[in-house]
Every structure is written in structure tokens, then in C-alpha cells.
Image: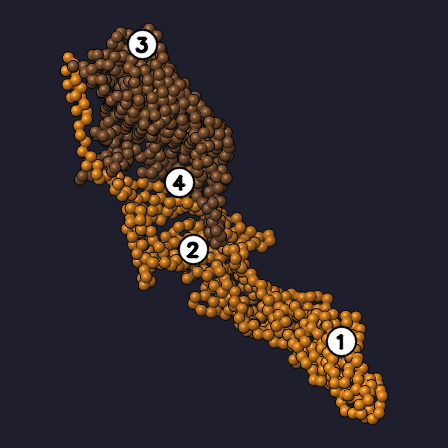
Amino acid sequence: MKTRLLKWLGVLLIGLTGCYDYSSLDNIVIDRFTPEYVFPLLKSEITFKDLAEKEGTNSVVEQHPGSNMYFLAYRDTIDLGLATDLFPISSVSFPDNTLDFGAALTPGFTSFGPITIPFNQAYTAIPGAEIKRVDFTGGIIRITLTNTFSHRIDASISLTSLKNSSGVTHPPINFSPLNAGQTLVRDVDLNGYYLDLLELPNTYNNIKYSATATITSSGNPSLLGNVTIGIAINSPEYQQITGKITYAYNHTDQPYSIGIFNSTILAEQHIAEPKFSLNFINSFGLPSNVNFTRLEVENINGVIPITHEGPNNPGDLLIGSPNTLKNATPSKLCDTTKLVLTSSNSNIENIFDVAPNSLSFGATFNIGDAADPSHDYFVRNDSKFELQSEIEIPLKGWVVTNKIADTVLNVEWPDFKNDLNLTNQEFRIKFKFNNGLPLNMYLQIKFLDTNGALVTQLFDADSEQLIKSSPVDPESGESTGKSLSYSYIAIDEAKYNQMALSQDMIIIFKFTTGGTLHQNITIQSSDAIAIEMSLEASGTVKPKPF
Amino acid sequence: MKKLTILIISLGLAVGVKAQSELTLPFMSDVFQSSYINPTVLPEHTFSLGLPGVSSMYGQFISNGFLPKNIIDFKNDTAHIVPDKLLAELTDKNLLLAYTSLDIFHLRLKIRNGYYWFGVRNNFNVSFQYPKDFLSLALEGNKSFIGKNLDLTNLNLDATLYNEYSFGMALEYNRWVFGGRISLLQGLSNVQFNPENLTIQVDSSMYGHTMNANARLNMAGIPMNGAGDPNFDHAQELDYITNYLSNFKNKGVALSVGATYKLTDRIKFSASFYDLGFISWKDSVTNYNLKGQSEFSGLDILQSYLNGSDIETDTIIDSILDDFDRDTIHQAYKTYLKPKFNVSVSYNLFRRTILGFSASGVYNKKLYPAFTLGISQGLGRFLNLIANISYNQKTFNNLGVGLVIKPGPFQFYVIADNVYPAINPLYTTNGNIRVGMNIVFGRVKPAVGLPYR
């Protein structure tokens, strides 16, 4: 019995414990599997304002008060013709004058004087100008007296033209004693003083001063010698120059970027009622005008001039003839002149048909009027022309075609097969658009090799419509609702492999307006588009063997 | 080494569970360690001593999610793990377990009609429960969950390291033997993630994901840096280790009780339960809570993109997380040992031949039962052999063996509940092995020679 049991136990053990051939597990792999993933990528709602208005640029999207219609404005402000550039006054040294006692000195004299001698000195602070007065905020007048006598001189200089803000002449500058053979220098701070350069009745640019001197004998019998007076104005800084001043200032090129069309490569479009306006804020106290020598827009095809059309009305921006600019007065620091080109006084409505990417002008600013006898005009040290420009593009019009192209260079394509052991990969980007904008949008991407030759393109057709325009009111051109649409971009392994042969991509985006052909549509502030984007991705994973 | 790696990989793609009952150990009453299962076992020796590191080393793994043979195809000398078959095998609760136990010390003495012992051992277990959806997500992707519920609620993790200080005794009373063990548990480290709700719904239109979470991650005894984040930079410093091992602030208790009834000289019935206990984690505790719902339908970044602004991904992630109520607190918590039981009957077929049958199980959210039929054969004074077969972890192919050799006072033993991994790993969902050497002497019963001498 015991033997039988033990035998059965042995059989059971052997039966259950047959040797396993572990070599069958020498090679283990996980079979290929094909996961399919879906991810939401993007969910945003944007208005046209978000689309068109970019931080760091001069473009803004706004509405006029009381209007729901958007307009796109490119605004810029520049300063032209700064007074400190146009009318600098520099240091000047005037020729020396001489104080000579002449025959009044006789041998054996003990003392003579005082005597006073007046002097006039021409001062042309601004060439060609008749300056009545210069008010200073800085600089000095340097007076140098040199005594070549063998005797002592006691002298003083009175700068008759130099007055303080109350009109009181600067006190005499004392040079006593000025010993034999000695030179003395005195500086007078100009800050808070002005030079009265008018010698009545009608002499301008004139500095008056006088020298008073007494000579005291040193016992030397020599009577030879004199006192030379040197005057210089060093590093003057003016606050205002008053007089009769004229100047012609050429500003040859002033460009403005129109960003919205920067990437447009083809356009058939029309923008209704655009406007170009310039505000000249003139702080020169001089009669001024500006003459536009050219005003034009430019796109990739060339330059198109903007012309004024019709009668000249006040406020029109004239091209080729002077536009009078209001100027500052003693009681008004500056004055503003607004000049405008609209669809009713120019060809500006047509020039946006070509999707220009810049606007530029050249102009001559004429400052002062030679025919005007007044000498009470002025230039301040901060006088300038502040030029505020605005290109206003109402979002109203029609677009049959507007193609925008952006190039992406040196694309590095992931190697799914070798880096991720992934084959048969398929991607599908799924879009959901709920579009309240009256715009249709299309997409195409072209893939180019290193020689710029086309390798493949995303869609076989010229372009694929991604977004469908919202319904449009036939009368007002306004959006009347939203259009829900789904779009897909599918890329299979074959397509991807072709794409991966490329180096650069050109993304071509086309949009057209909704409604009927050539119907003006209007983009309103309430128009928005909700975009959702998801990714469907699948691929066969081939795990590496253990 | 490669075979070992293959074996481990073939047995599991994921993680671990709580310790499973040992099935063969109860049949080896001569070995002190059998008292871990049944405190009423009566050994042959009056004295047993276990020295650190050599007395007992135990390792166990379980992967009950799939049977390897069902997911592997052999083609061209290559074993192909077939993902589709793997997914077909999995259920909504699949367990992976790694468990080790190392005896540090024990001393057992017989005093009059009773046996008394004191023992210390270190236990470490990592258990991971994963739902089928977890692997489906990796192998099939999330597309198959469109319009459905991706339920990860059953994604649980529990890792515990603790020391067990036990005092036990077994007393004979007429035909009865009563035994018990009470243990002081010294919790060292624990990580526990057991969400009440963790689901993701995928919208069928644009694939928006809605996440619902009500989950807490508990951690205790994990080294942290000044910012309160787990950091192991100082974990190897002597001061840290000394403080760590002498920290008794995370205490717990465990109880084991058993009874044996000797119906006749040949038939015995025995029943016991063990590992009924808990550890209260109070020191170095951090709890991370996540509760709420968040919907992610895509990034709202178009405006930033059009403006050329930087896209702050951290902010976006934070805004998603902000949808949830999140907090980090330091609140004591308890973890429970997984209680186990063993009921057995043995029949002394011959003088040193014992047949036995046992039903055992562990309760870990649900009952994991096992049934074992075994035979023990003594051969001479120094050798004892055990063989058994069990139904365990969904399989019948669990062939257990045990061997005890006692040259002099040294009692060497090796026990495994399932040697089938070595025989045919393709039919394996679990395995364990216990080896060690006790020092024993003082026979209670007279030495017996070979049965056929």
C-alpha cells in the first residue's frame, strides 16, 4: 500500500513537472499594435479685432462712436523738423574791439578817466534771419580784457543788450584793477537773460555794449598800449528766438506699414470708404505750410500714386500745392491742422483694391513767410511738427480673392519609423467652426524641396475651404447669424513621407467675403468665430524585442 | 538571468497586491515559520532559534490578470505577446503583488505543555491593482472610449514597509491545541492610493475630456525636502537611517488565533486566521487630496498665438488643476493588513505520511480563495518532503513542494507554493519561495528512522 502510494506520488510529480524548454522564450516580442488617440487641441473664440490687432504694431481695430462697424486703423506719430535741428545756435567769438585813450594821454600824466566807449556787434544767430531777441536757458558770454599799457587800468563792461526777464540790463562787469600787461576774463551766465538784438528803429542782429575805463600812471614814461575787448558766446542754449525767420525743410520719405496686407500675394477686393488723415501739430510760432511732393502706396506689383480729386475744400490734403498749417502764438503753444483724403476728394478708395502693404509720402515744410514784415514770430527750442497719421480702413467691402502666403523655412520632420517605431501613422485634424464673420476661408500648404521645387501639397485641389461665411444680410452686408461647419485635414503615411522630403513650407491662406459677388459686407464688433481643433492620431507601434 | 527576466516580464505588465496566503507552509509543522499561518502547530523540538538574515527569507509574486499562455503565440522561434489577447484576459480588477519577508530573530521554547515564542521580522509589500481600461488606454488608445467612461477607479497602489514584533503561544488541552500570536507593528513607510472615483469621459464631437476625481494619496515615512516634496537625497545618511529604524510613532497591532482538534490519532482539524490588524500612520504623514471635475476641450491660446505672446503652459495646466479641490494636509490614517485564514484537515496515512487538505484565503476587497491538497512524507530522522497541488489565482497548476533537512541542530528548509513557473512559466500566475535555517534541538517525540527500515 505504502509502495503504491509513493509510486503514484512520483508519477504525479513527474506528470506535473515535465521540463519546460526555456529556449522558446529566448526571443520575445510584443506584437504590433495600433492605438488610436484623440485629443482636443484648441478651443478659442476670437473676434476680428483679435485677428487684426497685433501687439507691438501700430494697428488698432475700433468703432466710431454710435457705430457697430469695425474699422482698422494704422496710427503713427512722428516728430518732424525739430527746432534744435533746424535752428541750432552755436558758439561764436566776435572780433576784438579796442579801447584807446589816444591823445588824451600826455607824458607825466598821473591819471585819466573814466572814459566810456559804446560798441555794436553784429550777431547772426540764424543765417538769413532778422533776429529781434534771443532768450537763453544756458551758455555764457565770455569777456576778455587785455591791458597792453605799462599802466594800471580800472575798467568795467556794460552789456547793454543783455537783459533779464524784467527787461533790466545786466549790471556792469568790473575789471579793476587791470594791471600793466595783464589779461582778465569774466564769464556771464546767460540763463534767465535775453539778448535784445533790436537797434531801433529797425536794425536787427545787433549786440550793444560799452566799456568804461580809467588809466593810472605807473611812472613809466611810455604812453604806448591799449585795452583790447574780446567777447564770445559759448555753448548757448535758447529758449526762444524771436524775429523774422524763414526756412524750407524737406522730408523726403515717410513710410507707413499697412500690416493687414503685408503677406497678401494676390487680391481682388474692394474696401469701401477708406480714409487717410494727417494731423499737423505745429509748435513753431511762424507761418507754415506743407507741400506734398508725393503720396503713394506700394504693393508687390509696384507703386500707385494717390491723387487729390475735385475742388479744393478746407481740410483737404492737397498734393503738389501748399497746405497752410496753423502755427503757435505767444498765448498758444501749438495749433493743429487736420488734412484728410477720403473717397470723395481722392482716388484713395481704389488704391486699396491692390492690397497695398505700405503708404509713403515726401513733403517740403515751409517755415516763415518772407513777405510778412512782422518780426514778432518765434521759434522755441522745443518747436516741431508733430505729425499724427491715420490710415483708416473700414471693414466694409468685398473680397473675391485675397491670398496670403507665409513661408516656414527649414522644417524638421519627425522620423516616426526610426525614432518612435511607428508605421502606418495617420493624422486627422478636425476643425469645428462656428463662424459669425462674413468671411469664407481657404487653406493650402505647399511643400518645397531644397531647390524650391514643389514636392507635394496638402490638398490636391487649389485650396480647401476650411471656414464657411456666416449668412449675410443682402441690404446691410452685416452678418445675420453663425455658420457651423466641420473641416478636416487628413495626412496618411504616404502623404507624410512625401511631406517629410520637403524642406520649406508655404502656407497659403485665402479668404473671400460672404454674400453675393461684389456685395459690400460689413464686419461688426459683435462678429466672432469660435474655433475648436482636435487631433485624431493612429499608428502601428512595433516594440523593440526584449 | 535572462530567463528570470523573461519570467518576471511574462508574469506581469503592472504592479502588485497584498500578500497571498502561503499554502505549503502549514504542512511543515516542524518549521517554526509554519506558526505564521497556524499558531497551533506543535513542532518536534522544544527549542528553535532564528538568527538575523538566515532564519527565513520569503519572496512572493502574483499576477492574476492573465495567464501567460493565453496571451503568447509562438511563431518562428519567437514568443509573441499579443496585445489583443492580453486585453481579452483582463478584467476591471487585476492585481500584481510583490511581497518579501525577512526574519530578523525568533526564539521558541517549550515550557510544560505550552510553546512560547518571540519573533521579529521585516515585511515589505507592494501591491498594484489596475483595471483593464488602464492597459486599453496604452494599447488601443482613447478613441475606443469616445462616448464612454474611462474608469480608472480601480487603479490602486499600496506599498508598505513595516517590522513585526510578535509574541505567541500554543497550549495543548486534551484533544485541543489553542494558539495565538499578538504582534506589535512598527510602520516604517507607506504609500497608498485608493481613489473613490477616477474617471474620464471623452466627448464624441470634438473629443473634449471630462475628468472626475475623488482621490487621496497618503504617504508616511517618505523623506521630504524643505518644500514638502518627496526627496531621497538624505535617505542614505546614517542619522536619517537610525532615526527611521527607531521610529515607533507609526504603530499598529496584528492578531493571529488558531485551534486544532485531534479527532483521532490519525485525523486532525485545524483552523486559524492571521494578519488581522492595522497600522496607524501618524508620523511624517502627507495626504494629497484631489476632488472635483474638470473639462478640457482644448487650449484657449489663439489670442496669445495671434498676438505673438508667450503661451504659458504651466498656467494652462494650473487652470485645469484649479477646477479640482486640491489640498495637501497632514492627517493620520490607518492601513489594514489583509486578513487571511486557513482551515485544514490532515490524515496520518502512515506513521510518517500525512495527507492534508486546506482551504485558505485572503481578503483584499474581495476574497481570494485557494484550495490545497498535499502530502507530507518523512524520510529518516533528517529529511521531510512535502508536495501539494493548489487551485490558486485562477489556476490549478500550482505545484507546491517543501524540503526540510536537519543535520544536527541545523534545520534547513525550502518551500515553494508553486514550482510551476520553473516547469512551465506559461501557466503561472503566482509564485513564492521561502528558504532559511533555524537552529533547533530538544526533541519532543523520540527520533524516528526511515519508515521502511
Chain represented in brown: B
Q: Considering the numbered disc 1 on the image, is that residue within a helix, a strand or a loop?
A: strand
Q: What's the CA distance linking mark 1 and mark 3?
A: 132 Å
Mark 1 vs 2, N-terminal side: 1
Q: What's the CA distance linking mark 2 and mark 4?
A: 28 Å
Mark 3: give few (<14), some (14-19) or many (20+) Cα within 10 Å.
some
Q: Are marks 1 and 2 on the same chain?
A: yes
Check the residue under mark 3 and report the chain it is in: B
**Residue at image location 28% in from the left, 23% down from the top:** B410
Label 1 is placed on what type of residue? Leu
Please tell me whether residue B407 is drawn above or below residue A504 in the rendered image. above
Q: To which residue does mark 4 refer?
A: B207
Q: Is residue B75 left or right of residue A198?
A: left
Q: Which mark is residue B261?
A: 3
Q: Are marks 1 and 3 in contact (CB under 8 Å)?
A: no
Q: What's the CA distance linking mark 1 and mark 4?
A: 85 Å
Asked whether residue A210 is in view, the answer is no
Image spot of residue B268 (x, y percent):
28, 11
Q: To which residue does mark 1 refer?
A: A162
Check the residue under mark 4 and report the chain it is in: B
Q: Are marks 1 and 4 on the same chain?
A: no
Q: What color was chain A assigned in the picture? A: orange
**Residue at image location 24% in from the left, 29% down from the top:** B421
